[in-house]
C-alpha cells in the first residue's frame, strides 16, 4: 500500500510540477502565480492532445478560451491591480 501512495505522489509531481515563486511577495501574487502555473500546465496538455490528433482544433481553442476566462476571473477576484502589469 505504501508503494502505491509513493507512486501516486511521484506521478502527481511529474504531471503537475510547480516552480518556486521569486517575485514580490504578496499573498494575492502568490495565489495568482499558482493559478498561472496551473493554466500553463493545462494549456500544454491541450496543445499536446491536439497535436497528437486526440482533440480537434476547435475543441482545443474552446477549452483554452475557457481556461483563459477562468484565469482572468481569478485575477479579478484577487483584486490584482494593473500594477502587476508594470512589475513584470
Image: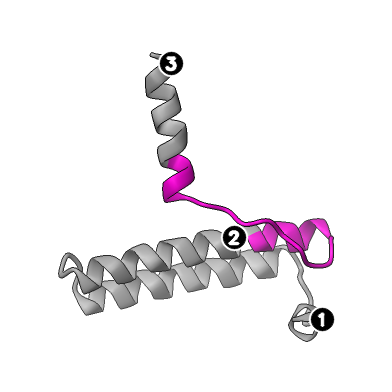
Residue positioned 35% across, 69% down in the render: 63
Front residue of 46 and 9: 9
Q: Secondary structure at mark 2?
A: helix
* Total marks in image: 3
Question: Against 36, is 62 above or below?
Answer: below
Residue 83 tag number: 1
Residue at 56 percent of width and 62 percent of height? 37
Q: CA distance from mark 3 to mark 2?
A: 30 Å
Picture coordinates of residue 1, whole percent (x, y): 38, 13
Secondary element type, mark 3: helix
Q: Is residue 86 magenta?
A: no
Alpha carbons under labels 1 and 2: distance apart? 18 Å
Assess whether mark 3 and mark 1 are in contact (beta carbons under 8 angstroms). Answer: no
> Does 2 appear above or below 9?
above
Mark 1 and mark 3: Cα distance apart in space: 47 Å
Task: Point out which mark residue 27 bears.
Answer: none
What number is the disc on residue 35?
2
Q: Residue at x 29, y 67 (%)?
A: 48
The mark that comes first in sequence, 3 or 2, is: 3
Q: Secondary structure at mark 1?
A: helix
Q: Which residue is tagged 3?
A: 2
Q: Earlier in the sequence, mark 1 or mark 3?
A: 3
Instruction: Report the magenta residues as a range.
Output: 12-33
Residue 30 lies in magenta, yes or no? Answer: yes
Q: Residue furthest left?
A: 53
Q: Position of residue 80 (x, y in %)?
A: 76, 71
Residue sitting at x 58%, y 65%: 36
Amino acid at each position: 500500500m505504501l508503494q502505491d501512495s509513493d507512486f501516486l505522489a511521484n506521478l502527481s509531481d511529474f504531471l503537475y510540477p510547480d516552480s518556486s515563486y521569486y517575485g514580490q511577495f504578496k499573498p494575492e501574487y502568490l495565489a495568482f502565480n499558482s493559478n498561472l502555473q496551473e493554466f500553463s500546465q493545462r494549456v500544454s496538455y491541450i496543445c499536446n492532445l491536439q497535436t497528437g490528433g486526440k482533440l480537434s482544433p476547435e475543441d482545443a481553442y474552446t477549452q483554452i478560451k475557457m481556461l483563459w476566462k477562468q484565469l482572468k476571473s481569478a485575477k479579478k477576484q484577487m483584486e490584482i491591480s494593473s500594477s502587476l502589469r508594470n512589475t513584470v
